[in-house]
Image: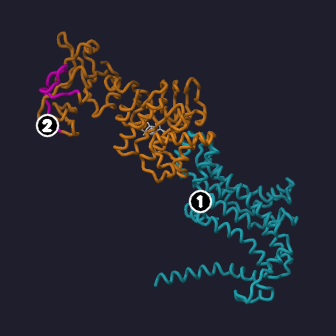
Chain colours: A cyan, B orange
Amino acid sequence: MKKLALYLILICAAVSFIYPFLWMAFISLKSVGDAGARGLLSSFFTLQNYKAVFMEIPIGRALLNSAIVALSTTASVIFFSSLVGYALAKLRFSGRETVFMIVLLTMMIPGQLTLIPLYTLIVRLGWIDSYPALVAPWMISAMGILIFRQTFISIPDDLIEAARMEGCGELRILTSIFWPLSKPAMVTVGIITFMNSWNEVLWPMMVVRRQEMMTMPQMITTFSVGGQSGGELGVEMAASMLLIIPILAAYAFFQKYFIDGIASTGIKG
Amino acid sequence: MAKVIFEKVVKRYPSGDRDTVRELSLTIDDGEFLVLVGPSGCGKSTILRMLAGLINVTAGKIFIDGKDITRLHPKDRDISMVFQNYALFPHLNVYDNIAFGLKMRGAPKKEIDDRVREASALLGIVPLLHKKPKELSGGQSQRVAVGRAIVRRPKVFLFDEPLSNLDAKMRTQMRAEISRLHRRLKATAIYVTHDQCEAMTMADRMVVLHDGVIGQCGTPHEIYSTPRNTFVATFIGSPPMNLFAAQAVREGAASGLKINNFVLPLPHLAAERLETGRKYTFGIRPEHIYLADRVPPGVNSSMPLACEVELAESMGNDVVLHCNSGGLAFQASLKHDFPVKSGDKINVVFALDKSHVFDEKGERVA
Ligand SMILES: Nc1ncnc2c1ncn2[C@@H]1O[C@H](COP(=O)(O)OP(=O)(O)OP(=O)(O)O)[C@@H](O)[C@H]1O
Ligand SMILES: [Mg+2]
């Protein structure tokens, strides 16, 4: 009986999380006339809205831009954060704890605070409307450093020493020993970074003006809010669906590691 | 292949207030199996790790084959090491663990494969090649660790208490196997242990270490029969050597050592070196004490000493007696061919030509 009640509560919770998503998915598949209806189901579904999105805005190009930006940001965050995490966890140098404290401190500064100085910097560098403007400021993350440091600290020093004896330099130790031993952490950092980068709207809005450099969320926001969609709910939802699908795919693919990672590091984005 | 020289090597840890290793000078000959032995914390691992390059040297130099390697990165020293807890890479299977060093050095695939198979055949671990380290027992893991060490054919092998995580039977077996392997590979090896039994059986030469200095360096037999000081004397041998406070006395022409309330006449050799009236330490190993009526022929024995057996510990073929003679406590190790019980009164003699005399500082006199 108790179990039944528990399941009921869980189902309610799950539905309340999932409903908006389902609603979006169904609307995006309904024809124009049908979109206003309350219920989820409709007599017939169509891909017409998706066609409209592809017709009206260069969504393909935006998808490519987003992919380039999100993937290079993710790769860079994994590489540089694990590099710093390794140094903070395993190398002995004076000031190590101070550096770590500074890294933690940067996590407490709200991101919005740094936007203006960053923007000024990008303008000075002449990087407006370019990939470096979208990637460079986010190439390393304090959260990534923290997760890698915590994971690496539990890897025994003996392995490092054995690897050194067997002919590894520090970089090789990181790539051939530490990376394979911390897959969950890498996937966690990877997914969180990818998601954040993929969903970012504000920053691209600031540094990108030309349409062919726009990222997906930027393009879709501009499209929906800026009136290009003609206020058609179905089309807007279709565009939003296109934004979500890659993330869902990535999550489904790495789910096992992601949950391991969150469970073992106790950190989530 | 390789001769290793330590030249006045000093190590002080940044956090330490004194030198962990003090002016160590030691030469290890090509192909020699040297065992470093000493109590916990005496600096054995420190010495090994300085040679490996895992920690730096505070002062002094280390040479391999005449080349100064003091400041080289471990990977450039051509040394391999077997760790106490194996330190196998958990994400690689046995084959890749063994092949790891060769891969890092960019050896051709064919050669790697040949060498891995040769090494694993030598160690009898061919059936394990595809297994992950966590699927192996302690003994198997240790074999893989040894395999990883030998496959590169380095100049020097280092072992840091490689057998201490194994059970007694496995330890004896691996001990023999490592010795056999060493004879076959003829490589220079330095082996750290705090188990004197391992040290005695495996070593070509052993170094007894005490607080970061060499207590004595020599063959196991030398160290057993002529320990240079009281530390070495009591560290090597089980049960440990009995030490008695003594004073040199002269009775007419003969000199002797007064221990407690009796005087032990000494062989002439020793007598000449003793200064009447000074304090000495007299040492006798438990196995050089006999029952007065069962002295083997040819033993130069002392006068019988009456004592009481406080405890008799049977070890199978030996029995260790904890004896007390008027407040003088000592242990005797006897062949187990007669009945002695706790509380018995017996007469024992010391084998004088096997006895040791140390001066007040603990240094060997005779
Ligand atoms: N990283 C370190 N920092 C400071 N002191 C250290 C460090 N490593 C070892 N020591 C100290 O140096 C001394 C020698 O240590 P070492 O590990 O060489 O001993 P050991 O002879 O190998 O002992 P064991 O038989 O217990 O392994 C010890 O007193 C130890 O506390
Ligand atoms: Mg040690």
Indicate the secondary structure of the residue bearing disc 2: loop
Q: Which residue shows up at 59% across the image and 55% down it?
A: A182
Name the amino acid type tagged 1. Pro
Quadrant of residue A238 in the image? bottom right
Question: Marks 1 and 2, how far apart in space?
Answer: 66 Å
Expressed as whole percent of the image width and height from the top left, the position of residue B354 reads: 25, 22
Quadrant of residue A15 in the image? bottom right
In the picture, the disc for residue B340 is: 2
The verdict on a common chain for dots 1 and 2 is: no
In the picture, the disc for residue A184 is: 1
Query: Is residue A129 shown above or below A162?
Result: below
In the picture, the disc for residue A136 is: none
Query: Is residue B24 shown above or below B121?
Result: above
User: Which of the two residues, A166 or A178, is positioned nearer the viewer here?
Assistant: A166
Expressed as whole percent of the image width and height from the top left, the position of residue A217 reads: 78, 69
Query: Is residue A128 shown above or below B101?
Result: below
Q: Magenta segment range?
A: B288-311
